[in-house]
Image (tube, rainbow, N blue to C red):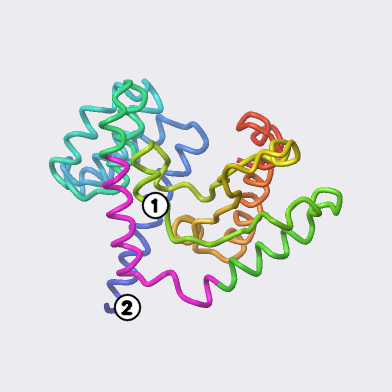
Amino acid sequence: MTDDADELDRRWDERWDEVHEAFDLGEFGRAQALIDRLAKELGDDDPDVLYERAILRWEQHGPAQAIALLDELLRVEPEHADGHYARGFACEEAGDREGMIDHFLEVLRLDTLLAEDLAVGTEDNLDFIETTAEHALARVPSEFREYLHNVPIVLENRPHPDIVREGFDPRALGLFEGLEHSRIEGGDHLAPTRIVLFHGNLLANFPDREQLANEVEITLLHELGHFFGLDEDDVERLGLE
């Protein structure tokens, strides 16, 4: 790729970043104007234009109102992973569990292929995640850490298809599996307990090392919270979402 092509890609990325910034700030009118401007150059049937229009409609009117645009997007670009991801959640909102799982499995397939093409799961990246997790674990107060000796923290690329078929988010960053601490203390040992960090999803979402380190720590503490019996509302209140 030439320097000119690199510069052109950078400028396009900056323009899409403006759209995402407007979404983050809740400035939907500005987001609409930016998308319209990009659509004039790329065309109304450009997959990214269709996707951003669908997300804008979702933000303004709810997921049901985004379905038609998401379906149009997936007709134009059947392998648009973000489109399948959004469509999966729209299915969930509509009570269509089978449709949700079908789209989630496609997200898992496409994300895995993209990661293989980009070769992001290098040994250096995995070492960085592992070291960051170890440092985060070392900062857990000793009165809690003593209960973690038999709770391995492992790295896996992405969620296994079997748990995605159960409705698990294919882009989840971590997973707590097994029994909570209180049940283990009560003598219940029917299932192994472990915490999983999905390095493929972490690297895909946080290519910047500083952001990655922060998210590894948040994800680890989030899953440790589940081990100690906190539910999703509890961990959200603690800022570990």
Q: Mark 2 or mark 1: which comes first in sequence?
A: 2
Query: Circle 2 sits in a helix, a strand or a loop, which is it?
Result: helix
Q: In the image, which is nearer the foreground, mark 2 or mark 1?
A: 1
Tell whether 192 sits left or right of 172. Answer: right
Identify the residue shown where x is 22% and y is 32%.
Answer: 69
* Residue 228 drawn above or below residue 160: above
Within the magenta stretch, is there residue 119?
yes
Magenta stretch in the rendered image: 103-126
Residue 62 percent location from the top left of the image: 37, 22
Q: Which mark is on residue 215?
A: none
Q: Which residue is mark 1?
A: 160
Identify the residue position indicated by label 2 in the image: 3
Taking the spot 34% from the left edge, 36% from the top edge, the residue there is 33
Residue 77 covered by magenta stretch: no
Q: CA distance from mark 2 to mark 1?
A: 39 Å
Q: Residue 141, how many percent across, how many down? A: 84, 52
Q: Can I make out residue 124 in this image?
A: yes
Q: Residues within 10 Å of mark 1 (few under 14, many from 20)?
A: few
The x, y position of residue 74, in whole percent, is: 18, 41
Q: Is residue 237 left or right of residue 66?
A: right
Image quadrant containing the N terminus: bottom left
The quadrant the C terminus occupies is: top right
Type of residue at label 1? His
What type is the residue that disc 2 sits on?
Asp
Answer whether residue 239 is visible to the viewer in this image: no
